[in-house]
Amino acid sequence: MRYQPRSDIPNHPAILANPDATGLLEDHELGGPWLVTLEDCGDPICDCDNVRLTLRQVDLDGSLTGGGLWLTEWIISSTGEYVGSDELGTTEQQLLDRAISALFPSPLSDFGGQEAKTRRIEARLSKAWIPPTEIHQGIMQSWVHHASETGSISLGGTATAGDVEHAGKQWFFDLFYCVNPDCDCRRFNVDVYEQRPRKSAPDQMDFVERYMVQGRFDDHSLEVIERLTGSDEEALAVVRAWFAHTGDPRETFERQYHQLREMARHSIAQGAQKQPAPRRHDVGRNEACPCGSGKKYKRCCGRGR
């Protein structure tokens, strides 16, 4: 089996038709070509080196072949190992084994390394854009949302700013920062979610919003500014447990804060490419946002208000 990265075949019809593809695999016995896509977990704070390998059989023009195989597996990029599936048939197993042999150690190890992941995060941040109206209104921004491929849990994605186990429960977090260049409040909001089994499917998990806790860079005080259930004591204990678990991540928070403020300055310089609908002050925080985004008001135009 022979692998060709997209950089070697930029004008191949299958590569042109599939801009997210990493390259092509060809095999005389198994046919093909096989479109290769490599993805990381999408969470910018995760230090795993797992890579999701997707193989799709395509025609030479790049379209999926009728009845062609479509196979996805998580690979440990540093070892080439994968979690086998009992549902794989003989042909699928053979295809996966041959693909890993052709892709390991490179490009799997190159793609899954932390340096490569950091470069992808920096590239996403360099292309991110914040509507100037949101900036001037003081609508707080999530670094994770802009840095991840999937978006943050607070805004409908799966990426998080961190997690911790506390009091027998698993807790996840998102961070929001003020990026208004006219403001120097130096504050951050921690959104706190509890992970619970989904009622309709107990083998799957949901993020359930519980608290919003506010802190500052210049002192160690924390204040609960929103509590949906539970108590202020639990909210503060959970956040402090996370801080203790990570060695107090305020230095990381401040770096993200400055990155977002630089992004905000760049967005303002680019000009207002699109304008959200005017804020309505009579909208309830848990009601649908009037801008039409489909999000709750407090998660959209009402963030930070």
Image: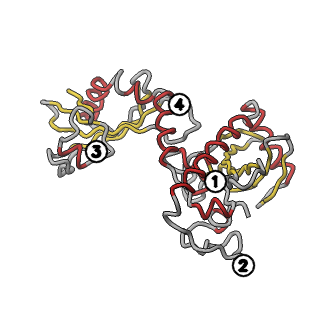
Q: Is residue 154 above or below residue 108?
A: below
Measured in 3D between alpha carbons, the distance from the residue under mark 2 to the one under mark 4, in whole angstroms, is 44 Å
> Mark 3 against mark 1, which lies toward the viewer?
1
Residue 102 versus residue 46 in the image, above or below: above
Q: Is residue 20 left or right of residue 62?
A: right
Q: Are marks 4 and 3 in contact (CB under 8 Å)?
A: no
Amino acid bearing label 1: Gln
Tell me the kind of residue under disc 3: Trp
Q: Which residue is mark 2?
A: 282
Q: CA distance from mark 1 to mark 2?
A: 22 Å
Would you call the spot at circle 4 few (<14 residues within 10 Å), some (14-19), or many (20 or more)?
some
Q: Residues within 10 Å of mark 2 (few under 14, many from 20)?
A: few
Which callout, 3 or 2, points at the residue further toward the start of the chain?
3
Alpha carbons under labels 4 and 3: distance apart: 25 Å
Q: Which residue is mark 3?
A: 70
42 with respect to 279 (left or right): left
Cα distance, mark 3 to mark 1? 37 Å
Residue 17 horizontal/vertical position (percent):
23, 49
Residue 124 versus residue 7 in the image, above or below: below
